[in-house]
Amino acid sequence: MRHLLSTADLDHAAAVQLLDTAEAMAATQRREIKKLPTLRGRTVVNLFYEDSTRTRISFEAAAKRLSADVINFAAKGSSVSKGESLKDTAETLQAMGADAVVIRHPASGAPHRLAAMGWTTGAVLNAGDGTHEHPTQALLDAFTLRRHLRGGEGDLAGVRVAVVGDVLHSRVARSNVHLLHTLGAEVTLVAPPTLLPLGVGSWPCATSFDLDAVLPGVDAVMMLRVQGERMNAAYFPSEREYSRRYGLDARRLRLLPGHAVVMHPGPMNRGLEISADAADSPRAVVLDQVTNGVSVRMAALYLLLAGEGSEA
Amino acid sequence: MSGTWVLRGALLPDGTAADLLLRDGTLAEIGAAGSLDAGGARVVDADGLVALPGLVDLHTHLREPGREDAETVESGTRAAAAGGYTAVHAMANTSPVADTAGVVEQVHRLGRQAGWCDVRPVGAVTVGLAGSRLAELGAMAASTARVRVFSDDGHCVSDPVLMRRALEYVRAFDGVVAQHAQDPRLTEGAQMHEGDVSGVLGLTGWPAVAEEAVIARDVLLAAHVRSRVHVCHVSTAGSVEIVRLAKQRGLPVTAEVTPHHLLLTDELVRSYDPVYKVNPPLRTAADVQALREAVADGTVDVVATDHAPHPTEAKDCEWAAAAMGMTGLETALAVVQETLVDTGLMGWSAVAERMSTAPARIGRLDDPALGLGSHGRGLVAGAPGHVTLYDPAAPTVVDPAAHQTSGRNSPFRGRTLPGRVVATFLRGQPTVLDGAMVDREPAPEPAAW
Ligand SMILES: [Zn+2]
């Protein structure tokens, strides 16, 4: 693995290897001394063109626990407006000797350009690009599912997952569809038709407009965040109607099989896509997802920078 | 500069071999191959080369005035000559916008000074391309530039009332409104064709219906006010269907397609390489096939380049930040060969029609009474000496660095195209010979100007 840009680039073996490595990393995190010397002397740059404190801190913690040097580079505002271009910034980081660039960018495909154009020789980790992908989020979701449903081993063959909400604008949904499919899970996207991409029929998943019909048959339900600006753009009539048709509340929670878990990439809009009852129920594994994020990101950095997979 | 030329043994569009004599700015004589006495004329061995009437582009962005960093009239018209063109229509989205007699006259004058091909300015339909009130169409028509094509290209004239008024108004001087058909609301934030690929890439889609709905409206408006409408760069199978229906009903509509829409699809966007970012966007393989068939059967009248040069930094960035547009003047004919001739869809006579006769007719460059010089009259004795010699058996790897345009944003870079322009004659004198620019003093102005 040279870069981690998209979960579509991961085959079954690579995906399982990432999850297994993350388990090994998680095991080290139960020790008294959490820090490993693995990436000593290597430099990881967090290049964030979009605010995301949660993701940045998670990557920062992962890199530091592997003893890497971390530079946080908050490229305020957007490269789309005038100012320093992504290319110039990348070349600056290259000159500083970055071994890995963790990039969050509002433009879909920006990490791909960074990796493809030779603006940096470091490994590129996509930490979320536009409405395209967020591969480490999908990996931590898969990791969390595997722990809860498969004892932390193997793949997710036969696991049924509903991904609910604003699929159209969700990089989390795109990354999860690829990865969960690769791992053998069956994914159903549930959303109003306005929030499903036109080409969704060619994706390796099912779709439904009816959340109540889907819930009884799933092992996990993954709620997506509804972004505030969607409300005024006629994607759905009103917040109330959305939450009535596609929100996870106490009644819908009871439709789930007893073993099923509730996931959310955070931050949650309580009362919109998820009610307080659902968010705080014992089935919700939202905080596990956060914890697991560090292990998964440690695994990704390890495999890109130190593992045997780090050859070109 | 004067000089007499004999183009020996060229293949005419109808497939017969012939000698062409260029003298005193005109195509003076056409004879059987080997029949014309060269006398003191210079001879070009045109054996195996296709002779076409000088190409006319209905849709070129020359960028000057205002964006000389992207292109100048000089560099853009050099590119045109290198591509076999003897006349181009320069789009109005310059800075300042070509929405007054002063600006169109300036562009016209710059074209004459450069001398590589005739430059016909396109006038803006609305002031500043802002879509709110009509520009002084009559003043531009009456200016020395004699504007006949009006377009807000880059923007759609989306207000139906304004579009109706523009169509009505230009009837007074036999003008045509060339519409960039794009419903602005349906394409807000659009980055590529809306379909399977956009969904996967997470790029906001530009739906086909945003083009088709405007075309449908405009042909109905044009029919209602009995005026000519021309549709710029149709890109979808549905657009073709609407134009076909309109023509069947005898409505006054013409349409163009670009070379890139005849060859490339939205699958290329998977690379996120902004060289493929263009408006309208690259569509699907089914659209490409429909467009090819529409050019072949005449539903689409014209192949026009939409040559849109940009400085390197405008493309050397992430997709969302990149400018839309592609260069095209120097590759158009070879792409047409690959997509339409080599596929057996049409012959060279149809190429001459789509790339010279029809665009000249739509822009009224074929009308000597207007005093605009004259193009698109075909290879007939007595016509102006505008001739393009093209070698259809000279596969060439596209290298944008070797192009005459200042733009390096060719979507065909690295691709092998099947042929190349060997020579271009403007008013009987070469602008390009043996594939190289003929640097020289500007050609004398045609007497009619
Ligand atoms: Zn246009």
Image (spheres, helix red, strand yellow):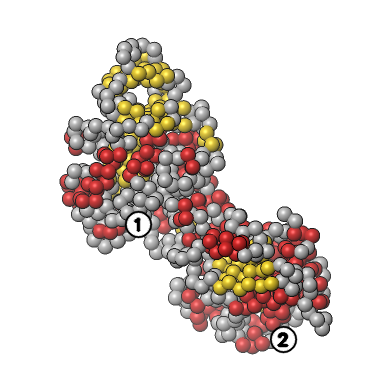
Q: Which mark is residue B155?
A: 1
Q: Which mark is residue A282?
A: 2
Looking at the picture, tell me which residue is in the foreground, A48 or B273: A48
Estimate the x, y position of residue A196 in percent, counting from the top left.
55, 66
Image quadrant where residue B183 sits: bottom left
Q: Amino acid at mark 2?
A: Pro
Looking at the picture, tell me which residue is in the foreground, B302 or A210: B302
Q: Which mark is residue A133?
A: none
Q: CA distance from mark 1 to mark 2?
A: 55 Å
Disc 1 C-beta below 8 A from ligand 1: no
- Which residue is located at x 78 percent, y 79 percent? A34
Q: Chain of mark 1?
A: B
Foreground tag (1 vs 2): 1
Image quadrant where residue A296 sits: bottom right
On-image quarter of the N terminus of chain A: bottom right
B414 sits left or right of B404 in the view? right
Label 1: few (<14), some (14–19) or many (≥20) C-alpha neighbours in 10 Å: some
Looking at the picture, tell me which residue is in the foreground, B166 or B437: B437
- Which residue is located at x 77 percent, y 77 percent? A35
Height in image: A113 above or below B410?
below
Element at badge 2?
loop
Q: Amino acid at mark 1?
A: His
- Which residue is located at x 59 percent, y 81 percent? A268
B446 sits left or right of B310 in the view? left
